[in-house]
Image (cartoon, helix red, strand yellow):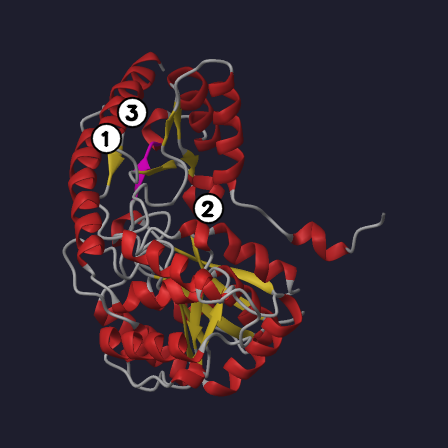
Amino acid sequence: MRLAQRMSQLGTETAFEVLVKAQALEAQGKDVVHLQIGEPDFATPRHIIEAAKAALEQGYTHYGPSAGLPELRAAIAEDVAKRRGIAVHPQQVVVTPGAKPILFFVLLALAQAGDEVIYPNPGFPIYESVIRFVGATPVPIPLREERGFSLDVDELQRLISPRTRLLILNSPQNPTGGVIPPEDLQAIAALAVRHGVPVLADEIYSRILYEDTFHSIAACDGMEELVILLDGFSKTYAMTGWRIGYGVMPEALAEQVTRLMTNSNSCTATFTQRAALAALNGPQEPVAAMVAEFRRRRDFFVNGLNAIPGLRCVMPRGAFYAFANVSALGRPSRELADYLLYEGGVAALAGVDFGAYGEGYLRFSYATSFENLQKALVRIADCVAKL
C-alpha cells in the first residue's frame, strides 16, 4: 500500500521504544530499573475503581454524547473554575479518551499548511509531531536551564509572526519539571491578546506541584476567548490506562472539537466517565499522599544525581521528572541513554528525544519505588565512573 505523505510527518514517544528495549533485556535475564515511562506507579484509588464497577452494573456500556456525559462535563467545569479562579460553563468542556485527542483536535481545527505553531523545546514530543502532521510549521521556543526551564518572554515575542496560529504551553513541564512563573504567564497572556494568538495550555501536571501554588494562564486578563486548557485524570489519579482526559475552550471551538470526536471516536467510554466523576467528587487524600511521596523521591533522587561527578540537575518544581545535565560527560545524550540501559540496567530517555534543545540532558522519571531509585543511583554512579 502507498501511504499518504503526511504519515512521514508523525513522530513517536521514545519512552515506549525504550520500554521495548528494556523488556527485551529483561527477557534475557537482565535486571532493569525503569525510569523511562511517565506514569504514576500508584494504583488507581479504590473508590474510583468501585465507581467504574458500579457503572458497568448500572448499564453504562452504551454510547454517550460525543462531548461527554452532562454530569461529568458539569463537574469538570466546576472543578476547573474553582482551581483556576475563572468562570467555566459545561458547554466549554469536551471529554476525550485521554488528553492527547485535545491536542490533536485543536491543531486540526486551528492550524494548516502555511501556519506556524510555537511550542516548547525540550517538550512533549507529540507537540511537534502533530504540528507537522496537520501541515503547519513547528516553531520551537527554547526552555533553558538557567531560567529554570521557563521560556524567555522577549524571545517568544520575536517568534510571533502574522502566520502564528497557536502557542502551546506546558506547566508544570515534561520533561524538565519546570514551572512558568506567574509574572511570565501574565506577560505571555498580554502577548497573546495583543496578537490574537490562541494558547493551548497543557496543564496535565497541574496537581503535581511541590512548593508552589498552581497558576494558569486561563486566569490572566483577556484570555477568556483565547485559551484552551488540556487536562485529564491520568497523572493526578493514577488513571493512565483508563484513557480519559478533557479540554476546556471557547464554546464555538468546543463545538468543532466535538464534531471531530463524533467523526473519530464517537464518544469516550461511559463507564470510565463515571469513574472520572467519582475521582473529582470523591476524597482527594490519595492525590495529596501521592504528591507527598513524589516530593520525597524527588528530593532523594535529584540530590543523589547532583552528588555524581559530571552530573548537574535542577530541582524540579512539578511533575515527576528529573532533567539531568550530562553535557560534562562529553557524550551525545542518546549514546549515554543506551550506555546506561545496556551497561547499567537503568532505562532513561535522551534529552534530544524531547527536541534539539534537550541535547546534553537525560530525563529520569522518579515515578517508581524508593528502592528502585536507590538502586538506580548506584548503577548510574558506577556507569559514569567507567566513562
Q: Residues within 10 Å of mark 3 (few under 14, many from 20)?
A: many
Distance Cα–Cα, label 3 vs label 2 = 22 Å
Q: SS of the residue at dot 1?
A: helix
Disc 2 residue type? Answer: Phe
Residue for point 34% across, 17% down: 383
Quadrant location of the C terminus?
Answer: top left
x and y percentages locating residue 249 in the rendered image: 44, 79
State yes or no: residue 113 in magenta: no
**Location of residue 362 (image quadrant):** top left
Q: Residues within 10 Å of mark 1 (few under 14, many from 20)?
A: many
Distance Cα–Cα, label 2 vs label 1 = 20 Å
Mark 2 near mark 1, Cβ–Cβ under 8 Å?
no
Label located before the other in sequence (1 or 3): 1
Q: Which residue is mark 2?
A: 354
Q: Is residue 368 positioned above or below 133 on the image?
A: above
Disc 1 residue type? Answer: Leu
Instruction: Please name whichever residue, 283 or 362, is drawn nearer the observer in this view of the structure.
Output: 283
